[in-house]
Image (spheres, grey):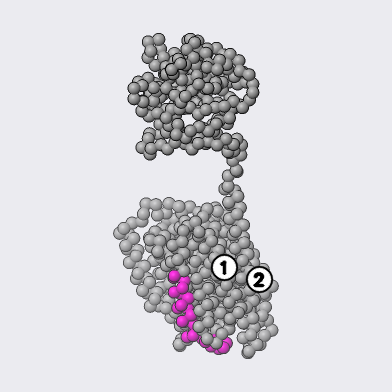
Amino acid sequence: MYRAHGLALPAMAVAVPLAAALLRRVSPAAIMLLGLAFLAVADAAGGFADSAATVGLLRVGHGLGAGLLAPATLAAAWRTVPAARVVWAAALAVGLMMAQALALLPIDEATSWRVTLQPYPMVTGVALALGAIYFVLCLRTGDPADARADWSLPWLPTLASSAAIALLAIGTTFSWMSAYVLPAAGLSLVLLLVLASFERVVGHAGRSAALVMIIVGMVVLPTAAQVTNVELRGLGGPGLSGLWLSFAVASAMAVVAAAVGARVAVERTHALVWAGLLLVVGGLVTVRLMVPVADGLPLIALFGLLSVGTALSVVASLRRAGPMSAVSAVSLCFSAVLIGYMLSVGIQFVWLRGVVPGPEMADALVGAVHEWALVAGFLVLAVIVYGAFLARQETVRAGAPAVAGPAAEAPDTPVPPPASVPEDTPPAHRSPSVRQELAMALLVPSQPTTTDKGDKGGADKNSTDRNGADKDGTDKDGTDKDGATDPAAPRQSEEKAGQATPPAGPDTPASPRLLHRHLPHDRPPGDETAPTASDHDRADDSAAGEPNGGISAAEPQAVTGDVIAAGDAGTQGKGEDVTREKTSGSPESPRKPQVEAPGAATGERAAPNGTPVAHGKGRSSDSGDQRG
């Protein structure tokens, strides 16, 4: 008879993964109604049980009903407001803490042993009626289109492990020695931890929830059950009547803790999970320090730590998991309850061996509870460390290597901040940041450049100054103002789209990787020839085959042997050049005279009739075209 009564929990552990598999095809409301029907039928038939086989069958019905309800209620809560998950987490914490007390309550005034088969028939009937109403409402409203979109995790590994652990737990009732029970429970725990480590089984974000469910299932229910048994009146405790106040206060604390955990930022839920598990460890320490007590009030601290820690860790872990990951974690939870019972019962076997009934047996039971609390505390800490290790490994695998190289190095020369651009400016007219310009300049190969020494700030306006020199540093006779070129900067060639691009010069567009000058958005008053950003955009649109990608074809600004000196920050956005100074002392040799045609600053060159022609169409292949 004792073995038949104990079949409910193994049946429940197997039913949870079966319910998870059904949730792929069936709505949670239907599974809830089915589970309540199992419970109602088992309760109704409990009054007619007359043999151990019948008792075992009815207890299996109780276990199947409860196993279907646990994941179905969680899935239903997931489809409603987030507050429903808070209620579910608090109910789980309270249920694990008070399960033994609620099972013993009907026995106080029992007149028949059959009352254990139908402990709360009225509650079962009300729950069945509410479940039927919920099922009808779901049929009328229908499920959301994506209600079962992510229910794709495999359920067979969890079902197989739960069935193996259930059979092992049943086998321990056949006069197994403690030398076999404890190793079997240890191997079962290792199996659950291995399953919780695979993302394929518990989901990408379900690992934390799986570890939490394993801990609370293995520790909270067996510990609370043993403390409740020790605090019964026959063993010197206050009895069930003296424990209800402690249970009520601890239940209220669990609800508050779950509500607080639901309001914490998601980024901090990892810390909240481990904090809740440490509170559970604190409750286990309180067991060794406090149990047994003659009054039930001090037990508020013990049950409060267990319930608050459970509610916090459960609700925090569920916030990072999906619905299927949460259901898989619940499957591991009730298998862990079986493991916890096997471990605690195995320790009791060791303490009760050779002990005769009497005061010595009571002391042995208390000693077994204390030892179990010690073992459970170390197991919780070990699982916390294991979870932190898995999280660290996942972070290392997901992390990107640090960026190294010239692009990651900051320039030694101070650079003025970029000019502010109005928010309503089109993206095509926005200038790149100074940091982006420097990074591009350090990465591209050197291009021939000249030193603008006579420029007074109007190089991009393509006009002549008072002494007849062009604004870009060329005189009327077509020579550079300093009359020299840089021999240390050889011409570079590159290929883009399978065609060679001629060297950049006054008449040819710059390479797409070269820096472009900032063009003003509006033409200055009185100067109708000054290029603007709009002219530059129209030139880019007309050049269909141009590989520049819209980059301005102003005078190239490579910085291989040069140092970029900081210019006035106010000149940016006004079309003025950044002064470049030579750092090498190499002599400069004369170069071929070059004349910049009108429109060169905008990527265009002038046709014989003065009409600007977009670069890429009809341009000379000789970048050193002499026009002087």
Residue 182 disc label? 2
Instruction: State the count of labels.
Output: 2
Whole-percent x and y of residue 287?
58, 78
Q: Mark 1 sits on what residue?
A: 278
- Where is 140 relative to 438, above or below? below
The residue most toward the front is 467
Categorize mark 2 by other alpha carbons within 10 Å: few (<14), some (14-19), many (20+).
Answer: some
The residue most toward the left is 140
Q: Nearer the viewer, residue 203 or 251?
A: 251
- Relative to residue 180, is residue 291 drawn left or right? left
Report the magenta residues as a range. 233-256
User: Which residue is depicted at the point 42% across and 54% down?
Assistant: 148
**Magenta includes 237?**
yes
Element type at mark 2: helix
Amino acid on which the number 1 mark rests in the picture: Leu
Whole-percent x and y of residue 38?
43, 70
- Where is 286 relative to 440, above or below? below
**Magenta includes 252?**
yes
Amino acid on which the number 2 mark rests in the picture: Leu
Q: Compute the Cα span from label 1 to label 2.
A: 25 Å
Whole-percent x and y of residue 127?
38, 72
Q: Main secondary structure of the magenta part?
A: helix
Categorize mark 1 by other alpha carbons within 10 Å: few (<14), some (14-19), many (20+).
Answer: many
Residue 293 disc label? none
- Relative to residue 520, is residue 447 drawn left or right? right
Q: Nearer the viewer, residue 490 or 524?
A: 524
Element type at mark 1: helix
User: Which residue is depicted at the point 57% across and 78% down?
Assistant: 226
Query: Where's the N terminus, which quadrant?
Result: bottom right
- Where is 323 relative to 112, above or below? above
Which corner quadrant of the image does residue 489 belong to?
top right
User: Which residue is depicted at the point 58% across and 52% down?
Assistant: 394
